[in-house]
Image: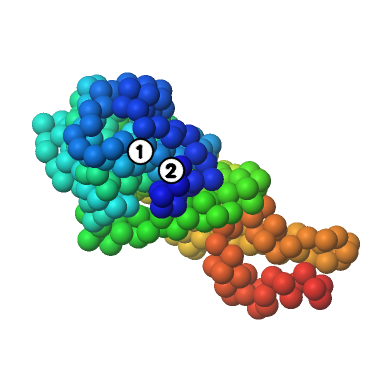
Amino acid sequence: MSPTAAPQLLDAYPLVRSRSVADASERIGRIFSRHQLALRGGELDVRHNQLRLNEVSLNVLRYGAEVSIDPGERGDFYLVQLPLAGSAELASGGQRVHVDPGVLSVLQPQARSHMVWSGDCTMLLVQVPRQVVDRRAAGMGSGAAPRFALTRSRRDPAVAAWWQAVLDLTHNLDQFGPQWLGQPAAAAAMSEFLLGAFTSMLCEPSAAPAEAITAPRADARCLQRAKDFVHAHTDRALSLAEIARHACVGPRTLEAVFQRHGEGSPMAYARHWRLQAAHRALQAAARDGRPVSVTDVALAHGFLHMGRFAAQYRAAFGCAPSHTLRWH
């Protein structure tokens, strides 16, 4: 980092620092796609930070000068670009768009593209291999590759909510990365949250045929498989697609099965069992006199937001988790 450079998100995870066009192009090309980098104005001051969460990588990149980036045909990965400052002009798939802190973009695998970043442009980049997204789409019951719009506006409430959550997550990791990454369940839950956008918020809806209503006996088998899977995985937050895949049905069918049996939603059921497991862990620690913190127990059961965990715990058990730990 240059002496006058302002702090940048994920500075604790530096990957590339360079003032050379050729050096920056070569080193960043190893991470993303081989590309031609051209300086259009100003003095280059590249700062690229990266943090990996299982199958997802979070990147914060700025060039410090106006540049053009021409990767030709991109690598085999999706790249969600969330501008933190400045703007960029993007050409891809026959479209030309403008992105800024109010508009994100989704670059497709192996699509030809060209970008021009303003001198003050800083991007938060979420990189995911194509096969990971395709695997999740298949788990959601779609045989076709998912489709994504090139840009999404922050005026869309769903986009705004996800965008803000990604920012909050990145800030949290920036400050407390070692604490979070030292908890495998927490790291898996963060990765799962980021990946969830590719099969929910970012993915364009397709005209997939509705699944047939299951017979009562098949209904019961499906429900039991889903419950068994939930009971065996109270150490992390499960996605609806994961539960449905292990129940051998699609997500919509699984939700319908749970409703028909008066079980609410699969996600609420899974959260209930994780709360029960956390409750038992706190009771056992208090009974055995073992030194343990509420935060450690929450993270070990896939709860990342401590305030939300405390509120859900109180609603379920009528007391704060710290009370269970002290007085059981």
Q: Secondary structure at mark 2?
A: loop
Can see residue 133?
no
Give the Cα separation between the discs numbered 2 and 1.
Answer: 8 Å
Identify the residue under disc 2: 2
Identity of the residue furthest to the right in this view: 288
In the image shown, does 287 or 45 lie closer to the viewer?
45
In the image shown, does 203 or 194 lie closer to the viewer?
194
Is 318 located above or below residue 284 in the figure? Answer: below
The residue positioned 26% from the left and 54% from the top of the image is 101
Q: How many marks?
A: 2
Mark 1: amino acid: Asp
Please state if 129 lies on the left or on the right of 218 as rendered. Answer: left
The residue positioned 52% from the left and 56% from the top of the image is 172
Q: Report x, y in % for residue 227.
A: 58, 50
Identify the residue under disc 1: 45
Q: Quadrant of residue 119?
A: top left
- Do callouts 2 and 1 mark residues in contact (Cβ within 8 Å)? yes
The C terminus - image quarter: bottom right
The residue positioned 40% from the left and 32% from the top of the image is 18
Mark 2: amino acid: Ser
Q: Residues within 10 Å of mark 2 (few under 14, many from 20)?
A: few
